[in-house]
Amino acid sequence: MTHFIDRRLNPKGKSLGNRQRFLRRARTQIREAVQKSLKDSSVADLEKDRKVRISTKGTREPRFRLDPKAGGEHDFVLPGNKEFTPGDEIKKPPSGDGGGAGKQASDFAEGEDDFEFTMTQDEVLDIFFEDLELPNLVRTTLKETPNKTWKRAGITTSGSPTQINLIRTMRNAQGRRLALHRPKLKDIASLEAELHALENAPEVDRERVVALKEEIARLHAKRKWVGFIDPVDVRFNAFAEHPVPTSQAVMFCLMDVSGSMGEREKDLAKRFYMLLHLFLKRRYERVDIVFIRHTHDAQEVDEQEFFYSRQSGGTIVSTALDKMLEIQKARYATADWNIYAAQASDGYTQSGDARRCVEMLNDDIMPLCQYYAYIEILDEREMEVFASDESGAELWRAYRTVAETWPNFATKRISKPADIFPVFRELFRKAEAA
């Protein structure tokens, strides 16, 4: 007989199966709690485990209760009864959840605290990013793409216990037992009943008794060597790797680091790009990220320099667009790549440069881009002054004309850390199916 023993350990002593079942059950409440807890958090806090508090309503098990309004007779055992004797009639309690009038709530009444637990970094990121995606992402090419998927490939005689095919295994075991004529318990039971009747009869047929005992012993022995399930019966589901078309994408991150961008503005822009970087690396395997910093001159930099360099200077935004086009033509053909761009600036540039940016976007960049997001970093006082989308700095007003022409061009404003997460979710919200 074959025994399967599951020796897999739960990580860090946690009941992983129960934990994931709970997360699925309370997913709506947990999603709202995660969004609320991230509202005023920094991007760096996403790398830490996070305590989440949800209402106990989402953790209660359903149960059946008697309806006090329903009719019928009910028997009760009331220990220590001093008021009633057998035969007394007790009035039905008033409608409600208890057997009598309850006490009114007071400031000192006991309540039930919200349920609080700790979520790991991976669980928080899964919840936060689950309904976000790169807009308009399309399949491109199979060239140089290692992505594969596992598909069913029939049945095999070896494999992992988690992939065992119970139906095929039991079918094989049934056929083997029939072929080897494995004795049935009911046949043995009938012989044992016959033997018992003969042994208790007035005249004992000893030859028949001996024959029955030998037959019963033979059948018991045959049941032992013809097992109910034998290792030769076990079958497993087989899986094989298959290459799949990959959606290749490149994200151009353009950040203004000129003198007009103060430390507060640069910090907000970096926080947004850190969240974007984390999102792309977690959700997509085949996404290149190109970092471009610009003052009056633009240059491609690595991740470390993009986030931590203290370069400063004048402001000419169009240089970043020139550098983006130069890199795209050299390395990212539109036939093979989805082109995305995210630009962060305070909205100020050299006189006349905004008009050149609009011409480059309309003529050269937007026809190539799947999606272009412009984020303007403002002071909180400026956010109040520029309340409408039509008012703002020169670059904002110019980019609004591009947004009216191209539906895949988005413009948003950020003035404080609490704006980053809502704006990010608006920019990369998953499109509803038509």
Image (cartoon, rainbow, N blue to C red):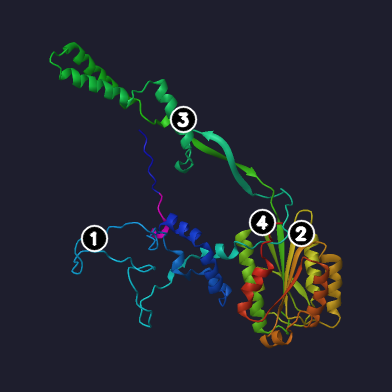
Q: Residues within 10 Å of mark 2 (few under 14, many from 20)?
A: few
Question: Rounded to the nearest whole Å, what is the CA distance between mark 4 and mark 3?
Answer: 44 Å
Q: Secondary structure at mark 3?
A: helix
Asked whether residue 268 is in view, the answer is yes
**Residue that mark 3 sits on:** 171
Amino acid, disc 3: Arg
Residue at screen point 19% across, 20% down: 197
Q: Nearer the viewer, residue 376 or 258?
A: 376
Q: Secondary structure at mark 4?
A: loop
Separation of marks 1 and 2 at Cα, in angstroms: 83 Å
Q: Amino acid at mark 2?
A: Arg
Question: On the image, numbered disc 2 is attached to which residue?
Answer: 331
Q: Amino acid at mark 4?
A: Arg
In this rendered view, identify the residue nearer to me: 105 or 218: 105
Q: Earlier in the sequence, mark 1 or mark 2?
A: 1
Residue underneath mark 1 = 77
Q: Which residue is mark 4?
A: 286
Q: Which residues are magenta?
A: 8-13
Instruction: Please name which of the two marks, 2 or 4, marks the residue nearer to the observer.
Output: 4
